[in-house]
Structure formats: C-alpha cells, structure tokens
Image (cartoon, rainbow, N blue to C red):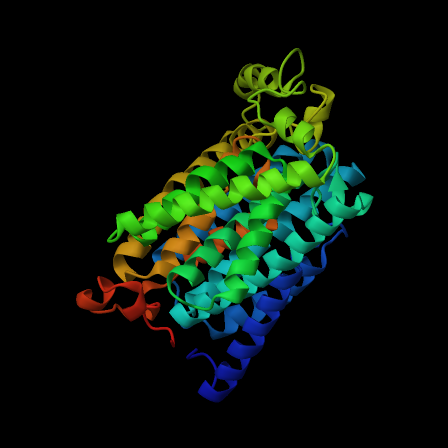
C-alpha cells in the first residue's frame, strides 16, 4: 500500500474487501447475463491494483497463464467473431478470467484473518444457495430445478453441488476448531443436503472422497478421533438419505439412476465417452482449436471435460495452460501449507481440489467459483501469515482454534 497515503490505502482496502465479499455472496446467482457478481468483481479490480505494494512470483505466473489462455480462446475463434453467440461467450469467458485475476490481486494483501473472513462469507453464500436448492426440490419450483435435480440459481446441478463443497469443508473447519456450533452444524447439513440433491455424480464423489480426506488431514495428529467422527458423519448421511427416500416420492429412483458410471447419455454413438474418443483425432488436426461453440457442428452436446475442451475448442496452447494450472496448483497448495502451517490454507487447497472430479465430467472453465478459488490460492502471500510456534501447532483443538485468529 505504498503507492498511496496509508490512511487512504486502509480505506481503499476495506472498501475493496467489502465489494469483494458482496460479490461472493451473490455469485451463486448465475442466471442473468452478465451475472451481478461479474460487475462487482470488475469494480473490485481497480482498487486492488492501487493498494498492492508488491507481487509474488507465483501471482505473476498465474496472471501470465490466464492471459495466454484467454488469448488462445480468442485466437481460436477469430474466424467466427461475427457470430453474436460467439461474441457473447467470449465476453463471458473474459469476465471469469478477470475474476481470477481480481481474486489473485486481492489475496496478495490478505493475511490469515482476511482469509478466514472470506471463508465465513463463502459459507454464507453456500447456505443461501443450498436453501434455494432445497426449497426448489421440496416445492418442485422449476426455476430452481433441472431434471428434478436441485440447482438453485445456477445454470446446472453440477455447478451448484461443486459450489457447496468448499462450504462443507468450511463447516468442518469451524466445528473442528470450535469456531461456533449452531451455525456450522446448520451450514454443514444444508451444504451436504444440497450436494446430495444435486444428484451430480462428480460432486458426490468429491464429497465422499475429498471430504473425509480433508478432515483426516485437519486431524492428522489425532487419527482415531477423526475416524470416529467420520463414521458418525457417514451414519448421519445414511439416516438423512433414508428420511429423504421415505419423504419424497421419486428420490429413490433418481438416486439409483444416478448411482452409475454410465447414464444413457454417456454411452453409444454421440454419448459423452464416445465424444471423448472421437475428440483426440480432431485435436491433432486443429492445433489452434475449433473455436468457441463450433463443437456443436460435430457433436450433439459439448465435450464435458475441461481438459479436452481446452485442447479441442481453444487449441493446444490453451490445453497445455490448463494442465499447468492444475499441476502447479497442487505444488503451490503444498508450498503454501508448509510455509504457513495454517489450516486456512488447507481449507483453500482442498476447496480447489474438490473441483477436479467435476472438471473430468464438465467444462468448468466458465465456473466463477473455480476461478475465484484458483486466484486466491495462487495469490496467497505467505509473508502475510505469522508462523505459529511448533508447540502451538501440535496442540489439540481446544488450545489451537486457528493460528493468528481470535478465539
């Protein structure tokens, strides 16, 4: 914050954070074009440029990767720029890429307390989204459903469920470190119910695998306690599912139909897996990509895989960039945790990784919450985190609610 007076910088910092958190609260509302959060995130970008005293090497790499990926998206579509639908999609992709840059610049100036505040705000947004999804499912509100699956105000159930996964982890964090009881419990139930009612195979797999792994990592010094609580949690999920089967007609049928590796639209000519196989020779023949929306000329549906989508639609460079973003995100997540010894960084890392199963079954490059989490992960500045003494880090939860955070 050396570019402006300290007092002014502090005011800009607070105003910027307020705008950013407001955008997070409403980012589950994706039906309008552009979404309300898009505009607010763009507004928050300018003050982020003014008050950041310095940048880190990983933030520069992140911004460079985003610029290269976005450039590749435009280059792939240069021959079809006269199509209004293509123009709109290019604008939408620019918005979400800008969101990633904004999140990265915002987190450069954040300390652990700021990240914890973000966690609480994000959890609040999850509660709103999950409540809308539950209301839609129980009341059969068409606006909030897709194929009788909860989606809230998202475009698709898989995005709705994926958005709620970090909320599950945030609730577990708060319960684990005694950061309240009633709100985290209610939030946990809402988020888990929302994920289950999305009936998204990728989201439920993420919940079933990444969720327990996250909790075990949080309690790696107390594995027996972690396992005992996970068993209780699994039992509670079974009970809730049983209640839903008895209470809502069609729930059991929908659950059984989704509990498979291959839905009817996955197999056969033109199915999801067939499109995967047929995309490889097309990728080799089109190094610059097919272009935005041009896949519709070849397949009945989009490719539904973020890695193949980047290669096929936007070209080899975009595909390589997306692989680098994924691989380097793992490296940076580990480095952040080792440098800070903070459970907040663990929450952020697992929130990003929980999106990976979704990326294998969906084109997630347009998901706002994914770019948000990626930007925060890459922009996290370990110098702003006070490393706690080793003896505190190894203390039980009652003595270590969270380093650097008020009890």
State the residue at coordinates (33%, 49%): 226
Can you give x and y, in whole percent of width and height, for residue 233 in the image?
45, 47
Residue 278: image quadrant is: top right
In this picture, residue 163 sits left or right of residue 317: right
Q: Is residue 190 visible?
A: yes
| Image quarter (top left, top right, bottom left or bottom right) of the C terminus | bottom left
User: In the image as oriented, which residue stretches furthest toward the top?
Assistant: 269
In this picture, residue 335 sits left or right of residue 358: left
User: In the image as oriented, which residue stretches furthest toward the left?
Assistant: 391
Can you give x and y, in whole percent of width and height, for residue 33 in the image?
76, 51
Relative vertical location of residue 389 with respect to residue 145 in this rendering, above or below = below
Relative vertical location of residue 228 with respect to residue 321 in this rendering, above or below = below
State the residue at coordinates (35%, 59%): 343
Question: Which one is in front, 329 or 88?
Answer: 329
Q: Is residue 153 visible?
A: no
Residue 197: image quadrant is: top right
Can you give x and y, in whole percent of width and height, for residue 145 in the image?
75, 42
State the residue at coordinates (51%, 77%): 13
Q: How many marks?
A: 0
Question: Which one is in front, 4 or 24?
Answer: 24
Can you give x and y, in whole percent of width and height, for residue 67 in the image?
52, 48
State the residue at coordinates (52%, 43%): 237
| Image quarter (top left, top right, bottom left or bottom right) of the N terminus | bottom left
Residue 16: image quadrant is: bottom right
């Amino acid at each position: 914050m050396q570019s402006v007076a300290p007092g002014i910088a502090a005011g800009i910092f607070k105003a910027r954070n307020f705008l950013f958190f407001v955008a997070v609260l409403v980012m589950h509302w994706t039906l309008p074009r552009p979404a309300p959060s898009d505009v607010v995130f763009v507004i928050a970008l300018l003050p982020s440029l003014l008050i950041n005293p310095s940048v880190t090497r990983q933030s520069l790499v992140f911004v460079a990767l985003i610029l290269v990926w976005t450039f590749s998206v435009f280059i792939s579509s240069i021959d079809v720029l006269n199509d209004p639908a293509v123009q709109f999609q290019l604008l939408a992709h620019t918005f979400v890429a800008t969101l990633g840059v904004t999140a990265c610049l915002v987190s450069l100036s954040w300390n652990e307390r700021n990240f914890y505040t973000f966690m609480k705000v994000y959890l609040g947004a999850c509660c709103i989204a999950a409540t809308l999804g539950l209301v839609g499912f129980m009341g059969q509100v068409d606006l909030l459903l897709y194929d009788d699956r909860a989606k809230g105000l998202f475009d698709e159930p898989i995005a709705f469920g994926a958005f709620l996964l970090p909320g599950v982890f945030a609730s577990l964090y708060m319960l684990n470190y005694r950061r309240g009881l009633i709100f985290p419990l209610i939030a946990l139930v809402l988020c888990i119910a929302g994920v289950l009612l999305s009936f998204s195979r990728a989201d439920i797999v993420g919940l079933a695998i990444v969720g327990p792994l996250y909790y075990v990592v949080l309690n790696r010094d107390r594995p027996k306690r972690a396992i005992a609580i996970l068993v209780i949690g699994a039992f509670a999920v079974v009970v809730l599912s049983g209640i839903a089967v008895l209470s809502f007609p069609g729930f059991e049928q929908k659950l059984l139909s989704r509990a498979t590796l291959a839905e009817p639209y996955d197999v056969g000519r033109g199915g999801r897996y067939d499109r995967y196989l047929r995309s490889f020779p097309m990728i080799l023949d089109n190094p610059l990509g097919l272009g935005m929306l041009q896949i519709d000329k070849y397949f009945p549906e989009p490719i539904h895989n973020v890695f193949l989508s980047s290669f096929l639609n936007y070209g080899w460079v975009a595909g390589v960039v997306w692989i680098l973003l994924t691989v380097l995100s793992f490296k940076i997540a580990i480095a952040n945790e080792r440098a800070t010894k903070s459970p907040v960084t663990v929450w952020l890392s697992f929130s990003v990784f929980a999106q990976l199963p979704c990326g294998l079954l969906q084109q997630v490059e347009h998901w706002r919450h994914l770019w948000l989490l990626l930007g925060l992960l890459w922009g996290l500045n370990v110098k702003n985190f006070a490393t706690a003494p080793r003896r505190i880090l190894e203390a039980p939860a009652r003595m270590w609610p969270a380093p650097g955070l008020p009890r």
